[in-house]
Image (cartoon, helix red, strand yellow):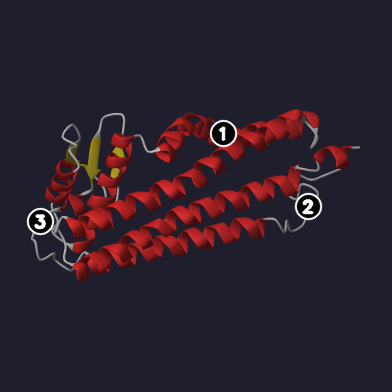
């Protein structure tokens, strides 16, 4: 007999919860880093005086990309590139701001538009994974729980649930090279196009490096969650026998 709370550890403390705790701490640390770094460099105005939106438009034009729209979006640090509508969406703290941080974030999103324009393989692969990852994120735990309730730890539904969650983990892993490549493009072009001075680019690089940590933390958290699932349910068939 296995209690649900412990799933093999009885009804007492579940040591696999430590894996979740590590993931939470990593995510909180990464978010704190990006907030503090962006706040620091958002107080440093660029010498060019260009806004995030102006810098984005100039970068896109420099690469011969004229069919991508740069537009404002509500929220703080909600910046993103939407390949479906070909829009670079910049948050309120980036679109009209002239700071080193704002221009860096805008350039990063333009990096994604450049990836899309040239058919960058990792971005295409990540886009193809989106529906599978969303499906896996929503249904993995329900399938695992239903499988445990009606079929025990060795239920095929449990194994399918773990497989679905693995798709979400794969999405997080593929996201890493996509984000780092976009940041690399951004810093390189900001320098070569003269939008930021060399020392300003160094500040932008710090902002984007801090932002990248959130993706690293997300990937690490997903891996830890998958590891926990495997520990709790992976040997279900042996324990049921």
Which element is circle 3 on? loop
Which element is circle 2 on? loop
Observer able to see residue 4: no
Q: Which mark is residue 11?
A: 2
Which residue matches tag 1? 136
The residue drawn where x is 23% and y is 48% is 91
Which residue matches tag 3? 50
Q: In the image, 137: left or right of 4?
A: left
Q: In the image, 49: left or right of 28?
A: left
Which element is circle 1 on? helix
- Number of residues whose C-alpha sits closer than 10 Å to that of mark 1, classed few (under 14), some (14–19) or many (20 or more): many
Nearer-N-terminus badge (2/3): 2
Q: Closer to the camera: disc 1 or disc 2?
A: 1
Which of these two is toward me, 134 or 141?
Answer: 134
Which of these two is toward me, 99 or 148?
Answer: 99
Quadrant of the frame with the C terminus: top right
Question: Whole-percent x and y of residue 107?
Answer: 24, 51
Question: Whole-percent x and y of residue 32?
Answer: 39, 64
Q: Residue furthest left?
A: 49
Quadrant of the frame with the N terminus: top right
Which of these two is toward me, 39 or 184?
Answer: 184
- Number of residues whose C-alpha sits closer than 10 Å to that of mark 3, classed few (under 14), some (14–19) or many (20 or more): many
- Number of residues whose C-alpha sits closer than 10 Å to that of mark 2, classed few (under 14), some (14–19) or many (20 or more): few
Tell me: residue 62, above or below residue 68.
below
Question: Whole-percent x and y of residue 164?
Answer: 61, 34
Do labels 2 and 3 touch, CB within 8 Å? Answer: no
Do labels 1 and 3 touch, CB within 8 Å? Answer: no
Q: In the image, 96: left or right of 31?
A: left
């Amino acid at each position: 007999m296995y209690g649900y709370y412990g799933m093999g550890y009885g009804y007492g403390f579940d040591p696999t919860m430590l894996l979740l705790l590590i993931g939470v701490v990593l995510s909180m640390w990464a978010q704190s880093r990006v907030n503090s770094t962006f706040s620091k460099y958002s107080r440093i105005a660029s010498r060019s005086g260009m806004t995030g939106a102006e810098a984005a438009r100039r970068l896109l034009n420099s690469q011969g990309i004229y069919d991508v729209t740069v537009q404002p979006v509500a929220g703080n640090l909600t910046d993103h590139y939407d390949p479906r509508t070909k829009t670079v969406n910049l948050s309120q703290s980036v679109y009209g701001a002239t700071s080193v941080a704002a221009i860096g974030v805008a350039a990063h999103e333009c990096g994604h538009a450049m990836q899309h324009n040239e058919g960058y393989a990792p971005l295409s692969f990540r886009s193809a994974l989106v529906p599978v990852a969303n499906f896996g994120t929503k249904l993995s735990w329900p399938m695992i729980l239903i499988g445990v309730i009606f079929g025990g730890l060795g239920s095929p539904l449990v194994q399918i649930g773990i497989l679905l969650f693995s798709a979400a983990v794969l999405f997080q892993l593929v996201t890493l090279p996509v984000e780092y490549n976009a940041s690399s493009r951004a810093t390189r072009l900001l320098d070569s196009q003269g939008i930021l001075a060399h020392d300003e680019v160094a500040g932008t690089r710090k902002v984007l490096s801090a932002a990248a940590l959130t993706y690293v933390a997300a990937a690490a958290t997903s891996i830890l969650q998958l590891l926990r699932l495997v520990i709790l349910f992976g040997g279900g068939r042996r324990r049921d026998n």
